[in-house]
Amino acid sequence: MALLEIKNLTTSFKIEQGSVQAVRDVSISLEQGEVLGIVGESGSGKSQTMFSLMGLLADNGKVTDGTIIFDGQDISPKNFKNKHEYDKAMRKIRGNTMSMIFQDPMTFLNQVLKIETQLIEPLMNHKKITKKEARLKALELMRKVGIPSPEKRIDQYPFEFSGGMRQRIIIAIALACNPKLIIADEPTTALDVTIQAQVLELIDSLREESSSSIIMITHDLGVVAKLCDRVAIMYGGKIVETGTDQEIFYDPKHPYTKGLLNCVANPEDDVEEELHPIPGSPPDLLDPPIGCPFVDRCERAMRICKLKMPDVTEFSSTHQCRCWLNHEKAVK
Amino acid sequence: MFKYTIKRILVGILTMFILSTITFFMMKIIPGNPFSQDNKVLTPKTYEALEAKYGLDKPVVEQYFIYLNNAIRGDFGESISKTGQQVIDIVIRRAPVTARLGSVAFVIALTVGVTLGIISALTKKRWVNSLITTFATIGVSIPSFLLAILAMILFGVMLGWFPLVGLKTPLHYVLPAIALALNPISMITRLTRSSLRDVMSKDYIVLAKSKGTSELWVIIKHGLKNALLPVVTYCGPMFAFLVTGSFVIESLFSVPGLGMEFTSSVINRDYTLIMGLTLFLGAIVIIMNIVSDIAAAMIDPRIKLGK
């Protein structure tokens, strides 16, 4: 049985102008130990899908439809009598069996609390241990994520740490209770390039050591190539293509996926090749299109694309795509 | 932390020096002197004798150095208008009255203000929020003497719940303390509210929730510690102003405190008493500022490093 099964998840945010359909009918499944990359540009709904899963949506956000089964338990918000019951159930999961690595190490650590306080918190929440034992465990975690002289560092404050070191602390917090699922929300985006490589290296080594599943949210296809077993491409709040890394990189089916791959520079090419950005901008999710969200930017858009959302076409048991071009009647 | 404290204390001493200098010369610029009102009664000879007694016949700069010299040795002189009374004794007699009233007002302001601020920041009921915000706006904008008079009429005269004059029993404290606290309550409510709102939308709050920490604990541990920082900084000077007394409230409720003494000393041109009271009030304001700065540095270790 899959560790995580998200079906038809729909999330919207109420704002003054109306309701933003950030996540539209998203289904994801994940096996124990698997690493899934979710790729998409800013505003494609990838982070909000994960915040919906964790139950950490902002106050104006709401999961309006869909089911989430995690670790054999139905944690869809609609499955609970009220928000209080939902929060109570999610509190037992968050930081324990499911945890999250956040994007910006500068803003996600509390500047007025010592590293120790922040690091032992998930342990104190979920394990029946004393503060002393938690501290020892925290030191062990700090060693694991590669922080030198943890005995000294544990009593310091976040502002005494560099960006890369802070991100290691955030990772250590996520790892604290040895979760079954780790969600990494663009863990390297806010870091500079050399530190990015180190942090990716760290996540890669942790993946090999533990049996945790990882969902990696990123807009960096390089990260996907390095870490992920499977990839889901999101656009306009929908998953437009999923497949193994091989299938996505060598046999992309969706024009958007192809466009993304065209945006990546290949350092092995001797010829100075120009990059091809995808022209246009993503759809307005306040008033989402009824058809394919990519239609306005797609070079090969057809009339049907504007009228109806394409069905899923299966190319293999792992490779699926939503695009009218794959329809049997489409001009190849 | 030690170095930080020492630095703050040295700056405080310097401030005291500047305060005494400016007050001294301002006092001298005001026309007249302690005896000028009795001019018609006093013969020129008595007048000169009196001036000589208090050293007022000497050049102003010399007077200043004499005063400074005495003050450093702890001698603030004798009150001019209240013959035979040492300035220090007057302060020692009057200060506790004001300080007691001020402390009661401070405790009320802090507890009520922070509580209202938290409720208003976190409530999802719109009417609760509007009620508190309206109250806070009224509290800030209406002068305390007006509210004090209204409270006196309503609770003292019409309902007769509380006595109006003096500070004899705990009941006597209720009205003046509330009148004093009203403005600080409103300020603290507004500060706490805006600061906590801001903090609760910060990224580290999301991370705290992602650890499975309960909502209440997230607010207390991760929210309040950050949110109360501006409140703590405000509390130092506020406490100083409360315990040094408000002339308006003290005269309305006939409280024999420092505020009343201060005003009468200025009217009487009682030079030594003016200086003594100014230095005393100044010292309290400075000390409370230092205390609140140290408290802030204890909450947020970045402050003492100047980051």
Image: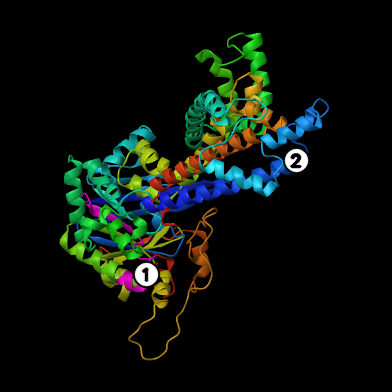
B255 with respect to A80 (left or right):
right
* Mark carried by residue A220: 1
Q: Mark 2 lies on which chain?
A: B
Q: Which chain carries label 1?
A: A
Magenta stretch: includes residue A190: yes
Callout 2, which amino acid?
Ile
Q: Nearer the viewer, residue B285 or A160?
A: B285
The secondary structure type at the circle numbered 1 is loop
Where is residue B170? Give x, y as percent.
50, 15
Real-space Cα distance between discs 2 and 1? 74 Å
- Give the residue at x 30% y 54%: A156
Residue B213 against residue A264 in the figure, above or below = above
Where is residue A73? Give x, y as percent.
25, 42
Residue A120 against residue B39 in the figure, above or below = below
Toward the right, the furthest residue is B40
For the question of whether residue A47 can be seen, the reply is yes
Callout 1, which amino acid?
Asp
Q: Which of B60 and A137 is in front in this view?
A: B60
B245 with respect to A165 (left or right):
right
* Mark carried by residue B30: 2
Toward the bottom, the furthest residue is A271
Q: Nearer the viewer, residue A228 or B26?
A: B26
A116 with respect to B60 (left or right):
left
Q: What stretch is highlighted in magenta?
A: A175-197
Q: How is the image coloured?
A: rainbow
